[in-house]
Amino acid sequence: MLIRMAKLETAPRSLPYKLTLLSAHMAATFALRSLAVSVVARLSFSSEVSRIRRRLVLSCRRL
């Protein structure tokens, strides 16, 4: 069993297989990057909303 796995790991990969792996890796990287960008944008938006809310509360207290 281990010998078979070792042979599979050392066997030269075909070009379509390598391209499939590369495209899957690129798709996963793009998805993770998009998720990170949306999370950062949402966090900055929520901090901006809380900042505006704080200003509104302070201005209402002054009235």
Image (cartoon, rainbow, N blue to C red):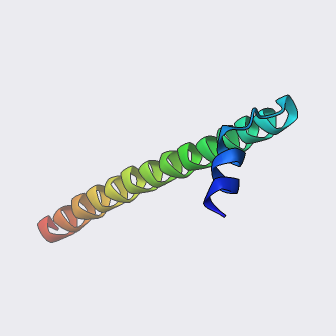
Quarter that holds the N terminus: bottom right
The answer to whether residue 17 is left or right of residue 40 is: right
Quarter that holds the C terminus: bottom left
Q: Position of residue 3 (x, y in %)?
A: 64, 54
Q: Quadrant of residue 4?
A: bottom right
Q: Position of residue 54 (x, y in %)?
A: 23, 63
The residue nearer to you, when weighing 9 against 27, is 9
The answer to whether residue 32 is left or right of residue 9 is: left
Residue at point 72% right, 44% down? 24
The answer to whether residue 50 is left or right of residue 7 is: left
Residue at point 84% right, 29% down? 15
**In this view, which residue lies farthest toward the right?**
16
The answer to whether residue 8 is left or right of residue 30 is: right
Q: Quadrant of residue 50?
A: bottom left
Note whether 27 is above or below 12 in the view shown.
below
**In this view, which residue lies farthest toward the top?**
15
Residue at point 34% right, 52% down? 48
Counting labels gives 0
The residue nearer to you, when weighing 40 against 10, is 10
Residue at point 75% right, 38% down? 23
Q: Position of residue 29 (x, y in %)?
A: 59, 42
Q: Quadrant of residue 62?
A: bottom left
